[in-house]
Amino acid sequence: MEKKETMKFPTRKSKKWKSSEIELFFMAMLGIIFVLVFAYAPMFGIVLAFKDPNYPSVSIVQSLLNAPFVGFQNFTNFFTDPEFSKVMWNTLGLNILQLLINFPAPIIFAILLSEIQSKKFRKVIQTITYFPYFLSWVVFGGIILILLENNGVINNVLKALHFIKDPINFGEAKHFWGTIIITSLIKGLGWGEIIYIAAIAGIDPQLYEAARMDGANRWHRIWHITIPSIAPTIVLFFILSLSGILNNGFDHIYTFQNAINLDKSEVLDTFIYKNGIVLQQYTYTTAVGLFKSVVAIILLVAGNKICKKLTGNGVI
């Protein structure tokens, strides 16, 4: 008798996790837990923006749990605050100037630096320009304030070159914006330059060789090869810079702020600190912070859509 052949169906064996996969899983879980605890959990405090600012409470938790809802009263109080126009003008003015001046500076500097043939000289310049980025604004700002004193190095050099007769008081309001823009440029130039240098290093050298054979000079190679190749990086950082148009950086502004230049130095970050931390108006300043976040999201989405239509590159 012939034996009937029984069909054997392939059995799906359970996949066992390797030790390396388990390690990666736990590493990822630690990152997720960190984000949930320190990024998403505190977002529950947004509720404070809609709570009664006059509720008598001892702590933030008590206001969060017991204070009655008042709708958009805190936002109305902010928009009608006598300081609103001054704070918004200083915030937007400083950030727009920094966007116009400090944003293209690292791009231009990186392109010029990439054209230098000497690698040693290029590394020395990169180290010098990148070093200030490692210093905190308290340390870096303290050094700058010493240099800008009436008897400081800057005034002495300007006197020696006969540019000025009397020392310039850089702490005055009329010099504040210039000081912030220049110090921000000095501190952030090296960081931006390294990012764009890395983007330029990823360009295929054969493109430059082909351009040379076609008779293209250095300017033509930069304009038609370098800039289009790093355009996605430029667009990415432009969108991120645009979304942070209401964020001046508290430590930067507060380091150079004093009673003399308060009219030109009071921005949203210092305004939130003084009203929230010093005066303990938690519900009011939470509304101001939420306003900043909403504007940032709107600018991020709008900037991304505009850049996608114009250049074809975007973040999302």
Image (spheres, rainbow, N blue to C red):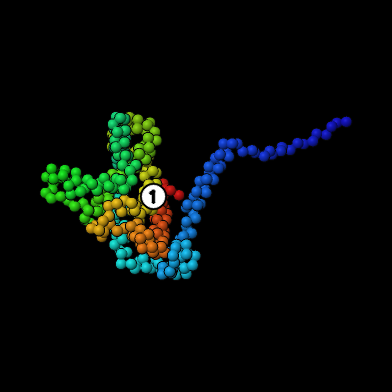
Vertical relation: 222 (above or below) 241: above
Image coords of residue 104 (percent x, y): 31, 45
Tell me the crowding category of disc 1: few under 14, some 14 to 19, or many 20 or more residues within 10 angstroms, Cα based. some
Query: Image check: 139 left or right of 68?
Result: left
Do we see residue 288 in this rendering? Answer: no
The residue closer to the viewer here, 91 or 298, is 91
Vertical relation: 60 (above or below) 96: below
Vertical relation: 132 (above or below) 69: above
Give the structural element (helix, strand or loop) at label 1.
helix
Image coords of residue 147 (percent x, y): 22, 45
* Residue identified by numbered label 1: 240
Query: Image check: 66 left or right of 225?
Result: right
Vertical relation: 91 (above or below) 17: below
The residue closer to the viewer here, 162 or 283, is 283
Q: Quadrant of the N terminus?
A: top right
Instruction: Tell me which residue sits at (25%, 60%) in the image.
Output: 263
The residue closer to the viewer here, 250 or 84, is 250
Image coords of residue 89 (percent x, y): 29, 60
Amino acid type, mark 1: Leu
Name the image quarter holding residue 199.
Answer: top left
